[in-house]
Image (cartoon, coloured by chain):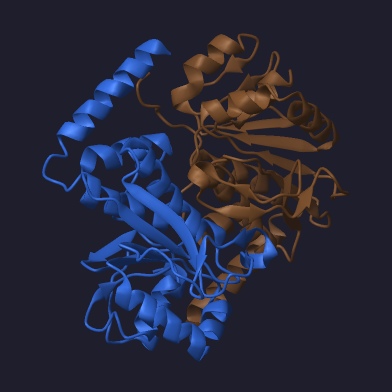
Chain colours: A brown, B blue
């Protein structure tokens, strides 16, 4: 164990050094958007990547959940009941990174026809540094007009529907995520892990991102042959 | 979208048919153990696999969270605050499958020295059909004496320490999970996804497991070359 620990410390020191060009003094506030019916792994994958990144950077990521209202939010099929860390009814740390997870399309459609929710989301995205949708979370961004003329991706199964509804967006297939600068979109469910690792690489360097991938015992990838093309 | 939906229905019908030998009438109660400091992705990966399996089997998996006491449980680094679905202070559905996620080793060690927690966990495991630990959740099973003379795995980084502490357990390296019958152990963090998909395959057949993997857009694997051997 001691030998492994020493190798780990060496790795960490190399990781920190190779990361000299990134802004390592900044603390990134990461808001994870929650709403009733949200898919658990859509946000949990990305969230845990940022939590682990906080652990190996001395807290350079401050991760919190955020919902429109302060009530308990239940994930898909009423599985996990979450008390939001912050809500839109009070003050919350302005997010540098806003994670927008997906849900089954009926849930998404219902929320997109809710003017109060879409108005709040639009104010939230206006104030966010960068955004990363996961899975069908891309529908919110497209519906808000944010993906016009931009490359983006979504869950492979929803992609044809997405392309039909939002012809102005340049749909990218066979990838885990698309980085369009201020707007990152990840593909289905577990792809949020790859999208978040990509963001950690951008902000903390490749060595920290590789370390986080090892901690969550995950092999990141960018390209992926989607099923049922 | 219609074409895809028809292909999906066809796939589902094949999936259901090829699964004739499994007991498709049984509803599996899946309890997800929560405790303060638990790692989010450790349980969220496995949990969402069972949630998606419920979705494509007409609710054959009933998934709920369970903690020793009814108070809100915060995940690692106080990130996500969860209100347990059930607690040990009241009645809860007896689990057919008990998911035991991990945490940083300090958290695990602290809980293992808590006699009330370990006593409760022991009663819980006695009453569970099968158990699946994820990551350092294997320490709880080993400490309770349940892994004696059994093959098991844990997070790659903790494996040497685990082997030293529990020499009676046959530690298996370079895998995502080990199935020892009533006791399944998954390796680090994201490996819980593979362990849960394996269990869905056992209980609902390979076609349903393959469908769940597609829904969460994940390529399952069993063997894996661990880092730093």
- Position of residue A222 measured from the top left corner of the image (x, y, whole percent): 51, 36
Using residue A172 as the reference point, say whether residue B146 is left or right of it. Answer: left
Up/down of B209 relative to B70, above or below: above
Residue B67 or A127: which is nearer the viewer? Answer: B67
The residue lying at 60 percent from left, 23 percent from top is A109
Location of the C terminus of chain A (image quadrant): top left
The residue lying at 31 percent from left, 46 percent from top is B60
Q: For residue B154, which quarter of the picture? A: bottom left
Up/down of A145 relative to B92, above or below: above
Residue A33 or B154: which is nearer the viewer? Answer: A33
- Position of residue B180 measured from the top left corner of the image (x, y, whole percent): 22, 68
Taking the image as drawn, is residue B127 in sight?
A: yes
- Position of residue B101 measured from the top left corner of the image (x, y, whole percent): 46, 66
The residue lying at 27 percent from left, 86 percent from top is B168
- Position of residue B143 measured from the top left corner of the image (x, y, whole percent): 39, 85
Using residue B26 as the reference point, say whether residue A25 is left or right of it. Answer: right
The residue lying at 57 percent from left, 30 percent from top is A107
Taking the image as drawn, is residue A22 in sight?
A: no
Q: Residue furthest front?
A: B91
Q: Residue furthest left?
A: B21
How many labels were placed on the picture?
0
Q: For residue A167, which quarter of the picture? A: top right
Q: For residue B14, which quarter of the picture? A: top left
Q: Residue furthest right?
A: A91
Residue A47 or A88: which is nearer the viewer? Answer: A88
């Amino acid at each position: 164990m001691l030998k492994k620990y020493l190798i780990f410390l060496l790795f960490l020191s190399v990781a920190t050094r190779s990361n000299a060009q990134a802004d390592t003094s900044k603390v990134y506030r990461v808001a994870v958007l929650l709403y009733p019916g949200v898919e658990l792994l859509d946000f949990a994958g990305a969230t845990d990547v940022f939590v682990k990144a906080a652990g190996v950077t001395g807290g350079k990521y401050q991760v919190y959940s955020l919902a429109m209202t302060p009530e308990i939010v239940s994930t898909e099929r009423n599985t996990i009941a979450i008390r939001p860390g912050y809500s839109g009814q009070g003050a919350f740390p302005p997010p540098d990174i806003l994670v927008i997870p997906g849900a089954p399309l009926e849930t998404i459609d219902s929320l997109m026809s809710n003017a109060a929710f879409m108005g709040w989301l639009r104010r939230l995205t206006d104030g966010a540094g960068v955004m990363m949708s996961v899975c069908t979370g891309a529908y919110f961004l497209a519906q808000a007009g944010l993906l016009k003329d931009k490359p983006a991706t979504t869950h492979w199964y929803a992609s044809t529907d997405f392309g039909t509804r939002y012809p102005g967006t340049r749909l990218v297939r066979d990838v885990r995520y698309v980085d369009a600068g201020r707007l990152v979109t990840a593909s289905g469910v577990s792809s949020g892990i790859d999208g978040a690792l990509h963001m950690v690489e951008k902000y903390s360097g490749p060595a920290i991102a590789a370390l986080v991938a090892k901690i969550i015992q995950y092999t990141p990838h960018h390209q992926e042959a989607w099923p049922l093309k």
